[in-house]
Amino acid sequence: MRTFAVTLMMAATLAVGVTTTAPKATAQVGVEVGVAPDCPYGYYDVPPYDCAPPGYYGPEWFSGGVFIGSGPWFHGPEHFHGHVDNRFDRAHYHGEFPHRGDRADEHRRVDASHFHGNEMRDGHGHVVKK
């Protein structure tokens, strides 16, 4: 009888151990994108985030002469739509590109009266219909 009681106690203990569940774990996932590219006239809004030439971004992409960012570093307002001149897009433009760390040449900066935007973008790599 003692053996039966011990076996029953072990079976009950095993049943409790098997049927109890581990507490649910919650996790947060973060993505580190690093520092925004240091480009004199802004950088393209899609990887590899190369420096854009002067004339690609319209004046609404700058605040006090400082680029508001694009892609993962976009710091513009929600629902932002800004003009770009896609003739300066990497797929079409074959001129000289600035390099990271270059300083802006004020003579190459395109002001609002000389900018000829032909496409609207949202700052996150998407073309927006006008």
Image: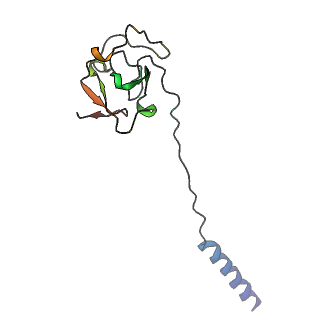
Q: Nearer the viewer, residue 55 or 17?
A: 55
Furthest residue to the top? 107
Residue at 35% over, 32% down:
125
- In the picture, measured across the screen, residue 88 lies left or right of residue 74, that is left
- In the picture, measured across the screen, residue 37 lies left or right of residue 115, that is right
Furthest residue to the bottom? 1
Residue at 27% over, 34% down:
128
Place of residue 100 in the rendered image (x, y in percent of width and height, measured from the top left) = 48, 17
- On the image, which quarter does residue 88 sit in? top left
The colour style of the image is rainbow
Place of residue 57 in the rendered image (x, y in percent of width and height, measured from the top left) = 34, 22
Q: Nearer the viewer, residue 55 or 31?
A: 55
Residue at 50% over, 15% down:
101
Q: Nearer the viewer, residue 31 or 69?
A: 69
- In the picture, measured across the screen, residue 74 lies left or right of residue 86, that is right
Place of residue 36 in the rendered image (x, y in percent of width and height, measured from the top left) = 49, 27
